[in-house]
Image (cartoon, rainbow, N blue to C red):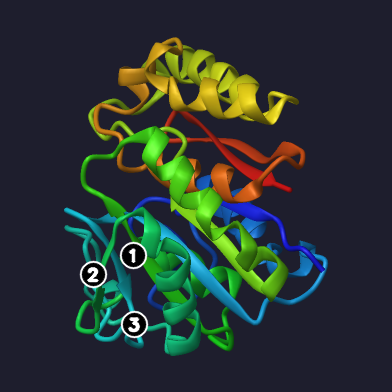
């Protein structure tokens, strides 16, 4: 059975786990938490492994984390002390890491990374989506040039994994401008979100890839993403999704931002 690919929002820092007593998050984040919590059940079958690309790991050339992702990388700042003790004790998958390397070897794959832990673009959404930490995970870096076309091509190379029980996940945010929050951001964020969604859900897969690769031409593009790293995981998910349908399967407002999630294939 062929699995879809996903572009998911990973929230803001440890937003789902701010209560040291384990209570629910701020109401603003609860719809996103519910979306992430339902991801695995929404699939046609439970994946044997996850390949995840996070907006928080860039390398000059592609790198694959082949370890178990520990210790975790708490790459957020100014949050309560207990949020620096969160854990998601899943395991890596050496077999999947080798398979990813084989698929990417013709496209500039560089090296394995055995030491780096999983960043919060990995463990925060996965603590919600896979709370029992019982699905092995491999993380793939972004290429530091952040080329949309290159990352779509990387996704296409990874497409065969969908028929091998592997869930390909891009973890980022469809809107990510930490300098603007609140109602003053909403009109531009809404216009950007509508334009991005129209491009992502373009029925023709060739036109879809071209429109999303040209994301900087969309309204308020650089308002939404002063830097592109939180959008580039979308390119990988889109490329891996192939010629199948593309839909927005999550939409909400947080911090005054319009935020969407997408599913391909």
- Residue at image x 77%, y 38%? 245
- The residue where tag 1 is placed is 120
Within the image, what quadrant is residue 238 found in?
Answer: top right
The residue positioned 30% from the left and 56% from the top of the image is: 108
Q: Does any portion of residue 169 appear in the rendered image?
A: yes
Residues at marks 2 and 3, CA–CA distance in whole angstroms: 19 Å
Disc sitting over residue 74 in the figure: 2
Q: Residue at x 55, y 44 (%)?
A: 239
Tag 3 secondary structure: loop
- In the image shown, does 66 or 32 lie closer to the viewer? 66
Say if mark 2 contacts mark 3, CB within 8 Å: no
Could you tell me which secondary element the residue under label 1 belongs to?
Answer: helix
Can residue 18 be seen here? The reply is no
- Which quadrant of the rendered structure holds the N terminus? bottom right
Q: Earlier in the sequence, mark 3 or mark 1?
A: 3
Q: Residues within 10 Å of mark 3 (few under 14, many from 20)?
A: many
Mark 2 is surrounded, within 10 Å at the Cα level, by few (under 14), some (14 to 19) or many (20 or more) other residues, namely some
Dot 3 corresponds to which residue? 66
């Amino acid at each position: 059975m062929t699995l879809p690919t996903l572009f998911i929002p990973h929230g803001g820092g440890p937003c789902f786990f701010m209560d040291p007593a384990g209570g629910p998050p701020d109401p603003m984040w609860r719809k996103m938490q519910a979306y992430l919590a339902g991801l695995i059940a929404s699939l046609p079958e439970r994946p044997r492994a996850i390949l995840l690309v996070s907006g928080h790991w860039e390398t000059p050339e592609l790198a694959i984390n082949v370890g178990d992702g520990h210790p975790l990388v708490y790459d957020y700042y100014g949050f309560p002390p207990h949020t620096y003790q969160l854990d998601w004790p899943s395991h890596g998958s050496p077999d999947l890491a080798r398979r990813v390397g084989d698929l990417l070897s013709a496209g500039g794959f560089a090296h394995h990374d055995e030491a780096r832990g999983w960043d919060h673009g990995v463990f925060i959404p996965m603590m919600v989506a896979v709370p029992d930490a019982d699905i092995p995970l491999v993380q793939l870096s972004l290429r530091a040039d952040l080329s949309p076309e290159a990352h779509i091509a990387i996704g296409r190379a990874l497409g065969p994994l969908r028929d091998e029980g592997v869930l390909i996940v891009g973890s980022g945010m469809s809107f990510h401008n930490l300098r603007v929050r609140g109602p003053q951001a909403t009109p531009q964020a809404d216009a950007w979100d509508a334009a991005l969604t129209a491009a992502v859900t373009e029925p023709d897969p060739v036109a879809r890839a071209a429109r999303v690769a040209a994301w900087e031409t969309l309204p308020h593009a650089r308002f939404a993403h002063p830097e592109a790293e939180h959008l580039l995981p979308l390119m990988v998910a889109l490329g891996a999704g192939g010629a199948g349908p593309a839909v927005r399967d999550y939409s909400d407002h947080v911090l005054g931002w319009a935020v969407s999630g997408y599913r391909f294939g």
